[in-house]
Image (spheres, rainbow, N blue to C red):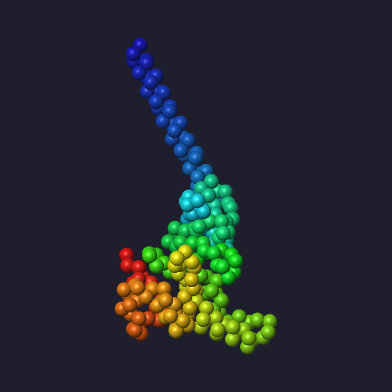
Amino acid sequence: MNATKYTFNVSQTLTRIFIILLSICLSAPIFAQKEKKIPSRFKKGFIVKQTGDTLFGHVNYNDILYIRFMDQNGKKKTYTAAKIRGFGDLEQSRFMESHFMAHKDASYFFERVVSGKYPLLFSFENASSQAPAIGVSGLLVGVMDGLISSKYISPFYFVKDGQLRVLPANADRFQATMLEHFSEVDYIIAIKDSPEFKFNNVVSIFQYMNPR
């Protein structure tokens, strides 16, 4: 009687193990298919909602105004820069944050280049605008617009007192802007008369201003 009961319990246990293993084997191809369905243009990442909540999934971005987000269930949704605080691309370790540009009355995504007390941001819009454009008025006007853009319009911004501010590419205006807003920073005090204090070194300047 006991031997029969023991045999029955062992048989029951082996049956359960077999069912579990079979379920795992059958579900593996399903998970693999789900993974294959993720388009290559989507990168592992996350979005930060206006509430501060972070949602992980996949992001697809190639625009400064909006992104496509696919959650962990495969559901896709478009978010404009005005609807979320920002998003991250985990595969490339990049974070883009949303800021309102008053003169354009719209919100755009900016890439955070340097983090810290004095963050440095990068605008893809201004970066592309530096290339000479061929306007309807002719080649000369287009080239002149390009030269003016490359000299004065900067792709770099910073945030101070809650306001987004551009860093002018023009040498004199760049130094004047930096001294106006960061004159109390020790590193700026140390290099203000140095030849290193120029727009071409903007990333390294902000890295030294924000020691890790």
Q: Is residue 94 above or below residue 149?
A: above
Residue 33, percent from left and from top: 53, 47
Residue 118, percent from left and from top: 39, 67
Which quadrant is the C terminus positioned in?
bottom left
The extreme right residue here reads 136
Count the marks: how many? 0
Residue 116, percent from left and from top: 38, 64
Q: Is residue 210 above or below residue 78?
A: below
Give the residue drawn at x 34%, y 72%: 185
Which quadrant is the N terminus positioned in?
top left
Q: Is residue 6 left or right of residue 15?
A: left
Q: Is residue 122 visible?
A: no
The extreme top residue here reads 1
Q: Is residue 26 visible?
A: yes
Residue 169, percent from left and from top: 47, 80
Give the residue drawn at x 51%, y 70%: 123
Give the residue drawn at x 33%, y 80%: 191
Give the residue drawn at x 35%, y 81%: 192
Q: In this view of the protein, which residue sits in the foreground, 21 or 108?
A: 108
Quarter of the image for residue 197 reads: bottom left
